[in-house]
Image (spheres, rainbow, N blue to C red):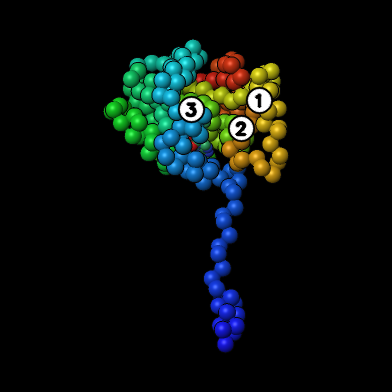
Amino acid sequence: MRRILRKIRRRFAKPTPPPPPPPFRHEYKRTWEALAETEDTAKMAVSGYLDEEMYRSHGLKTKGLLEDTVGLKADDEILEIGAGVGRVGAVLAPVCKRWVGADVSSRMVEHMRRRLAAFPNVEAVEISGHDLAPIPDASLDLVYCTVVFMHLEEWERYRYVREAFRVLRPGGRLLVDNVNALDDAGWAFFEHLLSFPPESRPPFVSKTSTPQELVNYLARAGFEAIGQRGFELFIVVHGVKP
Ligand SMILES: C[S@@+](CC[C@H](N)C(=O)[O-])C[C@H]1O[C@@H](n2cnc3c(N)ncnc32)[C@H](O)[C@@H]1O
């Protein structure tokens, strides 16, 4: 009798569901929600460190890069695509009219909102991962996207450049960057990541660009006055909407 009962139990036992498969590279929301579970895990995913002094000094470095390339004006309304925990927003909000931080992860957006709550001119917005749907046409003066393209498929890189064109006012400026595969340090970075066997590459693994790729995106989207410069192992490309 016991044997029969055991057999019945085995036959009708609820199967344990298999764990969800790891996300594909294009599943940006799933990937980055998991990485941003707490403020500390989000900070580690964004930068690899927790030290607030380093956040500030690296934020100031990016601000300097923006000043030297696309310029910063007190009446600028600015959007950062993939703004993380607001590393750059913390140093730009005090010097511009409005700073909008957009990110694919709702948790990242919450961390950013909390961290920048002292600034009345900051907005934190969740986006889909492939467009800027919540942002109206021709409503901004400057759009930038830093340390994000490396995590995106090429199509999403271009989609964001096209979307930046849509949301900028005439005369508005765009800046994007990525690790430069044609630079020696960028190539060392590429070779370092080559050590991942294909089957264990994480979905967010960094992929490089060439300057030509980024210049092509800006030109195809309609930007003019396209410029480029190296910045450590990065290539930085910028342009103006006519
Ligand atoms: C390395 S962090 C850089 C954050 C910030 N730009 C900075 O420099 O501190 C990459 C950020 O991009 C966001 N992200 C990843 N994929 C995205 C996508 N498809 N669309 C928008 N944001 C994305 C992540 O959630 C993360 O906050």
Determine whether the residue tagged by mark 2 lies in a helix, strand or loop: loop
The residue where tag 1 is placed is 189
Residue 56 x, y percent position in the rendering? 41, 20
- Give the CA separation, mark 1 to mark 3: 19 Å
Specify whether residue 224 is in view. Answer: no
Earlier sequence position, callout 1 versus callout 2:
1
Q: Secondary structure at mark 1?
A: helix
**Label 1–label 2 contact, CB within 8 A:** yes
Whole-percent x and y of residue 32? 50, 41
Label 3 or label 2, whichever comes before in sequence order = 3
Residue 115 percent location from the top left of the image: 35, 31
Residue 49: assigned label: 3
Could you give the CA–CA distance between mark 1 and mark 2, rounded to whole angstroms? 9 Å
Label 1 C-beta lies within 8 Å of the nearest ligand 1 atom: no
For marks 1 and 3, give the one nearer the viewer.
3
Query: How would you rate the neighbour count of disc 1 (Cα within 10 Å): few for under 14, some for 14-19, many for 20 or more?
Result: some
Q: Judge the density around disc 2: few (<14), some (14-19), many (≥20) Cα neighbours within 10 Å.
A: some
Q: CA distance from mark 3 to mark 2?
A: 17 Å
Is there CB contact under 8 Å for labels 3 and 2?
A: no
Q: Report the residue at 51% width, 20% height from top.
A: 240
Is residue 204 positioned above or below 174 on the image? below
Q: Residue at x 48, y 27 (%)?
A: 49
The answer to whether one can see residue 22 in this image is yes
**Residue to which mark 2 is pinned:** 206
The three-letter code of the residue at mark 3 reads Tyr
- Residue kind at label 2, given as amino acid type: Ser
Q: Quadrant of the N terminus?
A: bottom right
Identity of the residue drawn at 58% across and 47% down: 23
